[in-house]
Image (spheres, coloured by chain):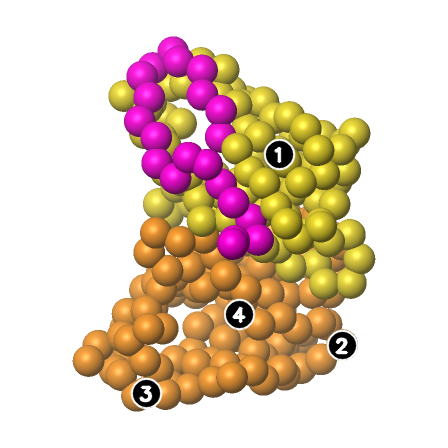
Amino acid sequence: GESVGLHLPTLSVQEGDNSIINCAYSNSASDYFIWYKQESGKGPQFIIDIRSNMDKRQGQRVTVLLNKTVKHLSLQIAATQPGDSAVYFCAETRAPGKLIFGQGTTLQVKP
Amino acid sequence: DADVTQTPRNRITKTGKRIMLECSQTKGHDRMYWYRQDPGLGLRLIYYSFDVKDINKGEISDGYSVSRQAQAKFSLSLESAIPNQTALYFCATSGSQGNYGYTFGSGTRLTVV
């Protein structure tokens, strides 16, 4: 079967440190990956995406890395801030309308 | 204004009652979705619609129905609510080409007592 999963349900980091959130996927046919952030009481918000023809993509303080060999996706957040505290979901798809979500990792930022 | 608007934001209803959750969007997207979120279970797809005349069941459609009244409106109904339908419900939209990512609404917290 296919699945998208995150390695850890909760990640706790010190403010100012870098955070790395991991995600494993099982379907090698997936060609598009997205990271979402969900703050308490809000809907998931798009953070960054990457297509399968790329290994790395950078945004503002965030970087997504894709390792197709081991079907692994990671989200790196630089200089983690209290406002980064949220649940982070990875999602993968092979076609529009076929987004499959992982279960989420809770990021806790300690002051 | 939000791109994807859900109403109501919170609702408490009694077992056996019919309830409708509404979603409207200003994104101009063709595709709309209803998801349910429960603690520890992530986002699960209830129904999705790729255009006004297209309705498809997702992985957990039992006990739910939908209506796509217009390109911009997609409503979810619980014909006879039961307590295990207590959850957070999200509407989402996406385009049909290019970026496959979804835009989510802020959610409806539904409690069935």
Marks 3 and 2 belong to one chain: yes
On residue A17, the disc is 3
Q: Secondary structure at mark 2?
A: loop
Are the residues under badges 4 and 1 in a single subunit? Answer: no
Give, as a single range, the part of the protein colored magenta. Answer: B1-21
Q: Which residue bears the numbered disc 4? A: A47
Residue A2 appears in view = no
Q: Callout 1: few (<14), some (14-19), or many (20+) C-alpha neighbours within 10 Å?
A: many
Indicate yes or no whether the magenta region holds residue B98: no
Residue B68, above or below A20: above
Q: Position of residue B39 (x, y in %)?
A: 35, 45
Count of number-bearing discs: 4
The chain coloured yellow in the image: B
Q: Using residue B54 as the reference point, say whether residue A43 is left or right of it.
A: left
Instruction: Specify the amino acid type for callout 3.
Output: Asp
Q: What is the residue that sits farthest to the front in this orientation?
A: B1
Residue B60 image-quadrant placement:
top right
Q: How far across and down, in percent of the image, does residue A90 sit? A: 53, 62
Q: Depth check: A108 or B4 in front?
A: B4
